[in-house]
């Protein structure tokens, strides 16, 4: 787009102005000129007919004198700003406004032939060569007893008609100029409301395309243009945040892989160079095995998370008893709970409570949540697992009374490898992938998970599952 769009509007405006003036000067000018001539001819013809039926008719019937007719023609000529004649059929002038005819000197219009005007109210030209300049002339016959005795002729100068037409044209030009000024105002309005914001948005997209996601711009508008600008800035901020998350992800992966690898390499080198005596090899080989197990767990977590993020992931949905699944998960932590002196309290709705979901994946969700709850709980405390049936959903809650999660970290705990500062001291072997896997599994089911936590008090994770229709049969 660059600068061409605005220039196209300017060019269109100039072409509009040019063709507007050309149209007024040609088409409109011709229409106005024709209108003025027809209108003036119609007016003069009515005047000529009136004279023919009154003064001229009285002259030929000897009811008035030539002097009287001369005076009347002169007065009417002044009113109409024209020249009025009375001609006989042969073209000899009988009377003329503003000039008395000398009986001894006949004035004859040579070639006068009224039949040439058949079908027309007026004629344009020099009136059979009588005038030196072009005039518009109308003729009205003077009749008596079905006989044409003569003609009343009224002439008006073409220059006068052109002056009248120019007055109307001037109005048309003024209207065109007003229209152009209004169009110019619209163009300025377009510049401020559309073009300037569009240029800002274009510049911003160029900056974002170049990788400058921190570029800021403002569009003070509440219409679609402002919404587009806000959406673009939001998109850029999300991309920037995604890039930051990616960098953090790579840093976390590198850190979590480097630590066990460094430990493994250090112990193996120490055993090879004799720093660790042979009698202690078994002890440190077990340490190395623990580190490799940590790497295996980290790798499996990444593979699991990658598979969960794959579009079109298939779920083996079945109707199963979520209460029984919770009991099985709780039983698997029995030894861990004894070691840490932590109890698990089950508050389950009914003996059986069916949900529709992928049993294996929901079991993994429960395992990860309970594992975290036990890991961050204080000794001699308890973890509470509760199920609730309401609004056609089954709500599952895993609640502990441990270290809690700081408020500023609660939005980030479901991100890969994310660990709060409080958890780093207690979660030495954690990968930071457990809650990410939980979220992705529930997203695949179309369900949600929320966290309620207070630092130093504990945390509660609540997720939903689809209620099975088998519960209705149990109620019946």
Image: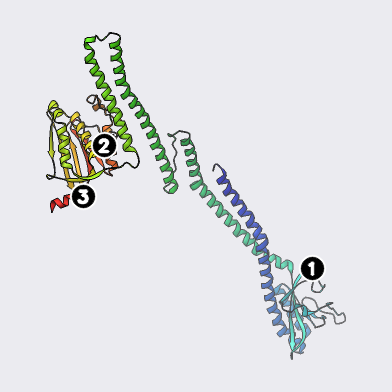
Spatial CA distance of label 2 from label 1 is 102 Å
Q: Can residue 380 be seen?
A: yes
**Could you tell me residue 95's position as x and y percent?**
79, 80
Pointer 3 or 1: first along the chain: 1
Residue occupying the point 32% across, 36% down: 307
Q: Which of the two discs, 3 and 1, sits closer to the camera?
A: 3
Q: Residues within 10 Å of mark 3 (few under 14, many from 20)?
A: few
Circle 1 residue: 133
47 relative position to 260: left or right: right
Q: Mark 3 highlights which residue?
A: 392
Instruction: Identify the residue at image location x=56%, y=46%.
Output: 6
| Residue 67 percent coordinates (x, y) | 78, 83
Of 275 and 13, the residue lying toward us: 275
2 or 1: tag closer to the N-terminus: 1
Residue 14 in percent (x, y) is at 61, 51
Looking at the image, which is closer to me, 70 or 174? 174
User: In the figure, is residue 220 to the left or right of 395?
Assistant: right
Residue receiving disc 2: 438
For the N terminus, the image quarter is top right
Disc 1: CA contacts within 10 A as few (<14), some (14-19) or many (>=20): few
């Amino acid at each position: 787009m660059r600068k061409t769009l605005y220039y196209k509007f300017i060019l269109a405006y100039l072409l509009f102005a040019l063709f507007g003036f050309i149209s007024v000067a040609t088409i409109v000018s011709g229409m106005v000129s024709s209108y003025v001539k027809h209108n003036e001819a119609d007016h003069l013809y009515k005047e000529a007919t009136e004279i023919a039926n009154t003064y001229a008719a009285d002259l030929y019937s000897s009811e008035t004198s030539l002097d009287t007719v001369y005076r009347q023609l002169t007065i009417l000529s002044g009113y109409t700003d024209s020249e009025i004649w009375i001609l006989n059929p042969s073209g000899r002038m009988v009377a003329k406004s503003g000039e008395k005819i000398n009986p001894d000197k006949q004035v004859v219009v040579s070639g006068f032939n009224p039949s040439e005007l058949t079908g027309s109210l007026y004629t344009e030209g020099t009136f059979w060569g009588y005038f030196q300049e072009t005039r518009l002339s109308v003729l009205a016959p003077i009749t008596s007893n079905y006989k044409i005795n003569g003609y009343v002729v009224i002439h008006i100068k073409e220059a006068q008609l052109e002056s009248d037409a120019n007055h109307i044209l001037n109005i048309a030009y003024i209207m065109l100029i007003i229209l152009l000024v209004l169009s110019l105002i619209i163009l300025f309005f377009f510049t401020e409301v559309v073009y300037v914001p569009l240029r800002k948005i274009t510049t911003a997209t160029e900056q974002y395309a170049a990788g400058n996601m921190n570029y800021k711009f403002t569009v003070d508008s509440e219409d679609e243009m402002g919404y587009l600008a806000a959406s673009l800035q939001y998109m850029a901020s999300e991309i920037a945040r995604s890039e930051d998350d990616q960098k953090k992800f790579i840093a976390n992966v590198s850190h979590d892989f480097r630590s066990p690898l460094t430990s493994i390499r250090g112990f193996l080198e120490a055993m090879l160079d004799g720093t660790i005596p042979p009698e202690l090899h078994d002890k440190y080989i077990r340490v190395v095995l623990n580190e490799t197990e940590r790497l295996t767990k980290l790798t499996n977590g990444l593979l699991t998370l990658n598979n969960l993020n794959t579009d079109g992931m298939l779920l083996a949905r079945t109707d199963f008893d979520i209460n029984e699944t919770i009991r099985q998960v709780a039983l698997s932590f029995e030894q861990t709970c004894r070691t840490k002196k932590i109890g698990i309290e089950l508050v389950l709705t009914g003996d059986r409570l069916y949900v529709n979901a992928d049993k294996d994946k929901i079991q993994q969700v429960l395992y990860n949540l309970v594992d975290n709850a036990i890991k961050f709980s204080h000794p001699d405390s308890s973890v509470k697992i509760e199920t609730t049936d309401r609004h056609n959903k089954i709500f599952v809650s895993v609640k502990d009374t441990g270290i809690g999660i700081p408020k500023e970290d609660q939005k980030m705990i479901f991100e890969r490898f994310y660990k709060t500062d409080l958890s780093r001291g207690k979660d030495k072997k954690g990968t930071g992938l457990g809650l990410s896997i939980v979220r992705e599994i529930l997203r695949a089911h179309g369900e949600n998970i929320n966290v309620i936590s207070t630092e130093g008090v504990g945390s509660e994770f609540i997720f939903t599952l689809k209620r099975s229709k088998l519960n209705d049969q149990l109620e019946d």
